[in-house]
Image (cartoon, coloured by chain):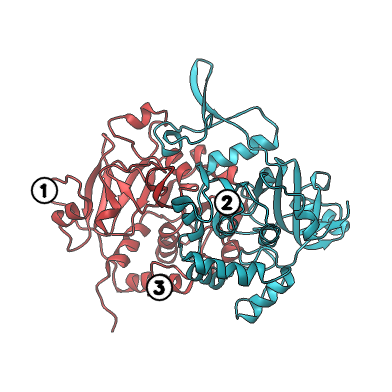
Chain colours: A cyan, B red
Amino acid sequence: MAVSTMTTAIEAVDGGDVVYVGGFGFAQPFSAVHELIRQGVSDLHVIRSSGGVLLDQLVGAGCVSETTIAHCWNAVGPTPTSAFRRAAEDGVPRPITVEEHGLGNLVLRLFAGARRLPFVPAGPVESTGQFENQSFSGKFSEVTFDGDSHYVMEPLNPDVSIIHVPRADERGNAQLTGARAEIKHGAMAADTLLVTTEEVVSSEQIQDTPDETVVPGFMVDHVVESPGGAHPSGVLGCYGRDIDYLEHYGEVTGSLDDFEAYLDEWVYGVSDRAEYLEAVRASGFAEVSP
Amino acid sequence: MSDPEPTQREQLLYTAAQEFRDESTVFTGFHWPVVAARVARKLHAPNLTSVFEAGIVYRGTSETLPTSTTEINAFDGNTDMYGNSIDTLHTFLKSGHLDRAAIDVSNVDRFGNVNTTVIGDYDDPSVRLPGPGGANDIATHAEDLTLICGSADPERYQDRVSYVSSPGHIDGDGSREAAGFEPGTGPSKLITPLGTFRFDETGRTRLDRLVPGATVADAREMTGWPIEDGDHEALPAPDADELAVVREVLEEAADRNYAAIRP
C-alpha cells in the first residue's frame, strides 16, 4: 500500500455510504471531512460518538441524510451546533434522521461490529427516550437468556471509516497517543479504512512504540499525510484544541447565510489543508504546528 | 474591595465542590461538574481522581481548566490512565469502585430524569438539543449520582420531562427498577442555585438544604414542585478565602470560553 493523496482516498467514499468518522473531542479528521464536502458526496449515514462541529459541517453542507450519534454540540462554550439544528428542526438544507443512543450503547455497537458479532446486549433501556422513540425499526430487540429478558442491538458496520492519528507508517500502522474513546472499534468495524495522519513516519519508529498502534497496517486501505488535519480539535503531542476558533465558529454559523459564508471561506475557498492552515494563521488563530 | 457575599453561581459551585472529597474517585461529567471539581481540587481535594468518558483517569490538579472533558492537552501530565470508552462507561461504572458520579443537568424533572434531546416531537422537533452523550450511561449505571443544575430558571424544572435522555427514577414508586435498572442506581441528590434536594424512597425530590437567604417559597417557585413547609438547615457559605478560590476558578472558566460565564 502506498501513501494516498486526500483526493484519492476520499474517492473511496460513495454517496449513500455508511461512514464512521473518528475522534472524540480530539483527533477529529477535519481535513478529510472538508474534502468530502468539496467532493460533494451526499446521502451519507454518518456515525459519530460526539457529533460536534465536524458533524455540523457535514450536515450543513448537505452531505448527510441520516446520523447515529450520542450527542452533537460545540464543546467549547458549550454552544449549539446550528446547522445540525436547522436540519433536524427545519429540514434545511435537507432533512436528516437522527438515531440517538447513550454513548455506552453506541460504543458497544461499534465494538460488536469490529468483532463481527451477530448482536450485542444493551444496558437497561426501557422507559428511556432512546427506547420509547424508535424511529428505526429493530433498534432494540428483546431476547431471552437463561430465563431472563434482555435487549440486544445490531452491530454497526460502516462501509468506510475515517480516523485521524498523529503517526502512521507507509504500511498503514496507525498510532494514537492519549485517550482512545471508541476510535479503534469504529476503525476496525469498517469494510474500508482511511487513516489520515499528522506525519508518515518510518516503520522503525512505529516498532519503537508498538503499544501505541491502534490499527495494524493490514487493516488499512489508505493512509494520507495531513499535517494539521485535526484542527480545530487537538492532537495530543502535536497541538491543542483551538478554543478561540471553535468559539468563532459558533458565533459566525448561527444563520444559514452565515454558515454558507463560513463554508465558502474555510472549505470551498481553499483547495487543500495547507491553504486552510495558512488561512487559520492569517486570521490570527493559533499556530498549528504538527 | 470585592463583595464578601457569594453570588448565586459562586454559592452553587461551592456547594457542588463538597461532593468531590479528597482521595475519592468521581465519574465527572461535562461542564459544571468539571468546574466544581476544580474548586474542590483547589480547596480540599488535591488528590481527587476524575474519570472522563473518553477513557481518561485524571488525578490531581492540572495547570489548565479543560474546556471540556475531551480536551486532553489541558490535563495531560495529570493522567493515571488513558483507556477507552468501554473502560469508562462499562467497566468502571459497573465495577463498584467509583465513589460517586456527577453530571450537569439543564432540564430536569422531580424524578431526576433529564431531557437534553428534544423539545416537541422526536421526529419533528421544535428544538433539537444536543443529546445525552455519556450522561445517559452515567445515569443508567452510577450508584451515587449527583445532578448539578446551574440555572434558577423555572423552565429548567419540569414536573415530568417529555423525553428521558438520561434516566432518573422514571415515574417514581419503583418504576426505575421495574424497567430493568439495577436497584441502588440513579440520582441521589440534585444541587440547584437555591438549595439541594435528595431523592426519597419513592424516587421524588425532597428539599434538603437551602442556600443562605433562600426560602421554601423560593424553591417552590423555581421548581414548581410540591415542597412542604418546614425548617431546612442552611448550606454553609464560603468564607473569604474559599470564596476567593471559587472566583479564581470562575475567572479561569471565563478565560477558557465557558459561555455561561462570559459576558
Disc 2 element: loop
Label 1: chain?
A: B
Q: Is residue A262 above or below residue A216?
A: below
Q: Which residue is mark 2?
A: B54
In the rendered image, which quarter is residue B246 located in? bottom left
Q: Are marks 1 and 3 in contact (CB under 8 Å)?
A: no
Q: Mark 2 or 3, which is nearer the eye?
A: 3
Q: Residue furthest left?
A: B229
What amino acid is at disc 2?
Ala
Q: Nearer the viewer, mark 1 or mark 3?
A: 3
Residue B51: % across, % down: 52, 51
Cα–Cα gap, marks 1 and 3: 37 Å
Q: Mark 2, residues whose alpha carbon is within 10 Å: few (<14), some, or many (≥20)?
A: many
Chain ID, mark 2 = B
The amino acid on which the numbered mark 3 sits, given as a three-letter code, is Arg
Decide: is B111 above or below B241: above
Could you tell me if residue B90 is visible in this image? no
**Residue B81: x and y, percent?**
62, 52
Whether labels 1 and 3 share one chain: yes
Question: Where does label 3 land, which residue?
Answer: B262
Q: Quadrant of the C terminus of chain B?
A: bottom left
Q: Amino acid at mark 1?
A: Asp
Earlier residue among tags 1 and 3: 1
> Image height check: is B43 above or below B191?
below
Residue B229, numbered label = 1
Mark 3: few, some, or many residues within 10 Å (few <14, many ≥20)? few
Residue appearing at x 33%, y 36% in the figure: B170
Q: Position of residue A70 (x, y in %)?
A: 52, 46
